[in-house]
Image (cartoon, rainbow, N blue to C red):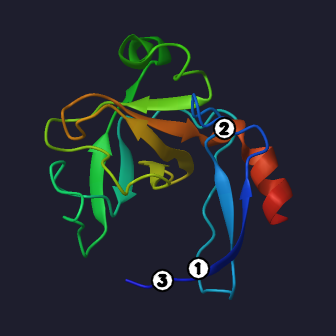
């Protein structure tokens, strides 16, 4: 695992820490690193039977120090926004959210914030891990920032 220093961060100008709307930031690294650019989604990325998410979050919801040494991956399916709002309410989950089902003992947990959600077939970045219900890994949905709502802002900040 490699670590890279950031010398600046651009937080979305409309970020709201109370309801986590616009929960998105761009890190500006000190040095350039070799990478393959992420594929941003079109306005409507199209359905996928399965999505993939990744993270280095804790693997034990009772122990925040139980961090994995290897990147964890899980598959999930999308839940309609109205169904997700039944769990979190319409103040937290909006059309700018991407809600995904979670399996018992598998889901986002502490340390996974900011991790990617990828379209299974074309690997477009469709979401960024935002929040979940506690305790994590309890089978409740995971909520991601819906990247298609922010492509213009991302391109403006990154110059891409």
Q: Residue at x 32, y 46 (%)?
A: 108
Q: Residue at x 26, y 73 (%)?
A: 70
Give the number of the disc on residue 127.
none
**x then y, percent, for residue 117:** 46, 48
Q: Which of marks 3 and 1 is in front?
A: 3
Q: How far apart are marks 3 and 2 (CA)?
A: 26 Å
Does 157 appear above or below 42?
below
For the residues bearing labels 3 and 1, Cβ distance under 8 angstroms: no
The local secondary structure at tag 2 comes to: loop
Q: In this view, does 62 lie to the left or right of 73?
A: left
**x then y, percent, for residue 68:** 23, 69
Does 125 appear above or below 80?
below
**x then y, percent, for residue 118:** 47, 50
Query: Label 2, on which residue?
Result: 22
- In this view of the protein, can residue 30 be seen by the observer? yes
Query: Label 1, on which residue?
Result: 35
Q: How far apart are marks 1 and 2 (CA)?
A: 26 Å
Does 26 appear above or below 23?
below
- Judge by depth and name the residue closer to the eye, 50 or 100: 100
Q: Which residue is drawn at 45% across and 52% down?
A: 113
Q: Residue at x 31, y 58 (%)?
A: 57
Q: How far apart are marks 3 and 1 (CA)?
A: 13 Å
Q: Is residue 89 left or right of residue 27?
A: left
For the residues bearing labels 1 and 2, Cβ distance under 8 angstroms: no
Give the number of the disc on residue 3.
3
**x then y, percent, for residue 123:** 49, 54
Q: Which of marks 1 and 2 is in front?
A: 2
Which numbered disc flags the more N-terminal residue, 3 or 2?
A: 3
């Amino acid at each position: 695992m490699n670590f890279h220093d950031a010398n600046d961060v651009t937080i979305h100008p409309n970020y709201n820490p109370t309801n986590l709307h616009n929960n998105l930031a761009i890190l500006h690294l000190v040095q350039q690193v070799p990478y393959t650019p992420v594929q941003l989604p079109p306005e409507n990325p199209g359905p996928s039977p399965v999505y993939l998410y990744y993270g280095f979050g804790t693997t034990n919801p009772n122990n925040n120090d139980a961090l994995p040494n290897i990147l964890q991956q899980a598959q999930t399916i999308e839940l309609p926004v109205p169904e997700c709002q039944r769990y979190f309410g319409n103040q937290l989950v909006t059309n700018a959210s991407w809600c995904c089902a979670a399996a018992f003992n598998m889901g986002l947990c502490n340390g996974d914030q900011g991790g990617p959600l990828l379209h299974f077939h074309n690997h477009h970045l469709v979401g960024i891990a935002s929040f979940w219900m506690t305790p994590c890994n309890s089978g409740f949905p995971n909520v991601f920032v819906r990247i298609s709502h922010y492509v213009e802002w991302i391109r403006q900040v990154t110059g891409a």
